[in-house]
Amino acid sequence: MTDISLDTLTTSAARPRRDIGIKKRYAAERRFRLYGVLAIAVGLAFLGVMLTSIISKGYTAFWQTTVTLPINFDEKIIDPSNKRATDPNVLITANYPKIAEAALIEKLGIDPNDKAEVRKLKGFLSDSSRVQLRAIVAADPSVIGTTRNVDILAAANLDSAFKGQIDLEVPESRRKVSDQQVEWMNKLKAEGVMAEHFNTGLFSYGASSRPETSGVGVALIGSFYMMVIVLLLALPIGVAASIYLEEFAKKSRFTDLIEVNINNLAAVPSIVFGLLGLAVFINFLGLPRSASFVGGLVLTLMTLPTIIIATRAALAAVPPSIRSAALGLGASKMQMVFQHILPLAAPGILTGTIIGLARALGETAPLLLIGMVAFVADYPTTPFDPATALPVQIYMWANEAERAFVERMSGAIIILLIFLMAMNIVAIVLRRRFERRW
Amino acid sequence: MKKALLTASAAAFAIAASVGYASARDQIQVAGSSTVLPYAKIVAEQFGETFTNFKTPVVESGGSGAGIKEFCKGVGENTIDIANSSRPMKKDEVQSCVDAGVKEIQEVKIGYDGIVFATDVKGPDWALTPEDVYKALAAKIAVDGKLVDNPNTKWNQVNPNLPDWDIAAYIPGEKHGTREVFEEKLLIAGCKKLGGVEAGKAAGLDDKAAEAACKAVRKDGKAVDIDGDYSETLARIDSNKTGVGVFGLAFYENNADKLKVATVGGITPSVETIAKGEYPVSRPLFFYVKKAHLGVVPGLKEYVEFFLDDQMVGPESPLAEYGLVAAPDAERAAQREAFGAGKTM
């Protein structure tokens, strides 16, 4: 090393610098950064397009057009032969839409005997007035014979027209609202009788064939039941399985096999779990179809691998020094796990659980096979009653022919996205606040 | 907190363990065709509103085949009561039903559904014939008595009266009930008129193979199978203004401001022309009732009777308004009578 002659050194210094490609390498780095930025930009652009399209189509679903009418609960229409004291069925089968129509006729100043004009009113008010007015009368029969202001829902096509979603330039015969109806609509709008209100029905109604009375009520309850069942079953089973595998089980071929299987199960398409649920829970165990209980069990099976993997990772991240310290102070292995390891791993476990739940909340495929992709109008009182789920309701509305369902579908997507976002934010907050790093 | 969680989980386990769960089902369960679904929903909803002592039936979607399969699982609490279908039940399906103990099935025809071709509303008028459809969409067509690969790329090559548009047709996918009607009433009908069957036989095919060759749809991207619903077909036409889509009559009528319907054989599809049997591309819609469940599942008999009532399936009913083509008066009366008499398949 020492006998390098001065001569060689000087000549090497005089030679032009060896090309180490620094410019090329810098350029490569700049290009790589550019690709990265482009990738993010493309991703954000797609997200932006998706959100804009959903929100621009869906925000109108949160408003619903109603017509406030002075309804005369006319005894002559509801109970013409005055039999309601003896036969309560009269109040159930009465022609309630007719009193709503009569009120509208009066409001518009149409001659009630002009049959042709009256016929044009068909499809102006929602048929749901039957149920709505019946409920008022059932709650308080003394209302018969009096007049009271009631907000009657406008029919879906009028609602769409009111919101400007129907192209009125198209010839009259090609659209679902007539010019006369539009004229009446504008008249009522000018009088302030017809107006948009916040659509509470979107959250409370069950499925319906009429867009104006369909909502995500049943779906919300079904999804809630399923999430509770998934949480109660998947969390304890998943955590117990991971604690055993991570802390107690000896490493052997068998545990390796289990690990490979769990990782595989996490990647199995969710419809496979639906098939399993149909075969085991419905056909073999005889549980009812379309019930959120069965849906919860299927989603539990689907979520378990996710929770087990997250829990094992969280347990493994607790440093061995904690274990050694606990054992060194005389704690039993059980005490070490439950008093030291588990509390330290809890944030990771909860994060994994919430992400698993969020995935389960958005699933439709496994529910298709157990009969939960269905038209369910009645509220489920127990988890054994037929119910649907939020994503299922979105799917069902996406297949409808009527225009008004499009906005409802987008509205339901917004509701689902809000739930998912809230769950993910909780997961992030939990991780930020409680996670410890060593 | 930990204790509460433990107790709750224990409770959940207890519920899970009580799999012998069985309480009388008080709700009708229906499954099947997505074409019949909107009609079944309307009836189910009105049934629930009219009969306040019964719950609203649950109507599952999923397709005719899947519905019939569920229907044929057997008799009892956890099997469905009614299968909706956009085609008659096949012989082997009836057999599988009988094998599983569903021996008595009542068939109910609710009306007819039309299948229409439609283009973007701003396009020119279209007049199609089954021959045009065959010449435009079949994989091989008969030219001078010989089967050749379909050479047509534009509609006006098929028929000079049609516009100069590239052929782009969005037709129902193979799992759709609509597809069968499309093949039978258009492709095979057109094929027979143009001598495609003879050409097939001349090429050494037997009767069945010649018919199969008739209904084979071209696979070069000019005919696109839509496996989703009609709303997907509508979206395709929205993005390709020179595309032609196949829809159900009800769907078209609900979207008449976006679509223009084509005549077939000179007849404009409408409830009237289909009811009279003039419009060629239509099919009956059915549902199947498990006789063993009548009188066991509360409201089942009332539901079917309500469905068959003229105020539901008649010419001025909510179903007709949605796009169902009502069966002729005599046929409706016969359906009611057959159900009342308990006639089984």
Image (cartoon, coloured by chain):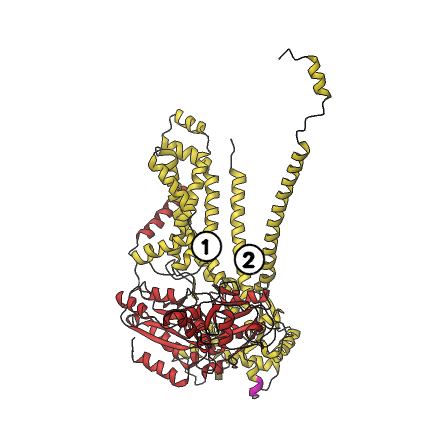
Chain colours: A yellow, B red
Asked if marks 2 and 1 fall on the same chain, the answer is yes
Please report, as a chain letter, where disc 1 is located: A
* SS at badge 2: helix
Q: Which residue is farthest right?
A: A14
**Of residues A381 and B77, which is closer to you in this image?**
B77
- Residue A363: give its label: 1
Question: For the magenta stretch, what is the residue range?
Answer: A109-117
Is the residue under label 1 in contact with that under label 2 (CB below 8 Å)?
A: no
Quadrant containing the C terminus of chain B is: bottom left
**Res. B323 mark:** none
Can you give x and y, in whole percent of width and height, for residue A101 in the image? 54, 80
Q: Which percent across, then down, holds residue A263? A: 41, 43
Q: Is residue A402 visible?
A: no
Report in which chain the residue with disc 2 lies.
A
| Rendering quarter of residue A104 | bottom right
* Relative depth, front residue between B67 and A82: B67
Q: Who's the residue at 31% across and 58% down the image?
A: A283
Amino acid type at mark 1 = Glu
Sequence-wise, which precedes: disc 2 or disc 1?
Answer: 1
Magenta-colored stretch includes residue A112: yes
Task: Give amino acid for label 2.
Answer: Ile
- Residue B334 falls in image quadrant: bottom left
Image vertical order of residue A161 relative to residue A238, above or below: below
Residue A185: horizontal and vertical position, in percent?
A: 62, 76
Q: Nearer the viewer, mark 2 or mark 1?
A: 1
Residue A414: give its label: 2
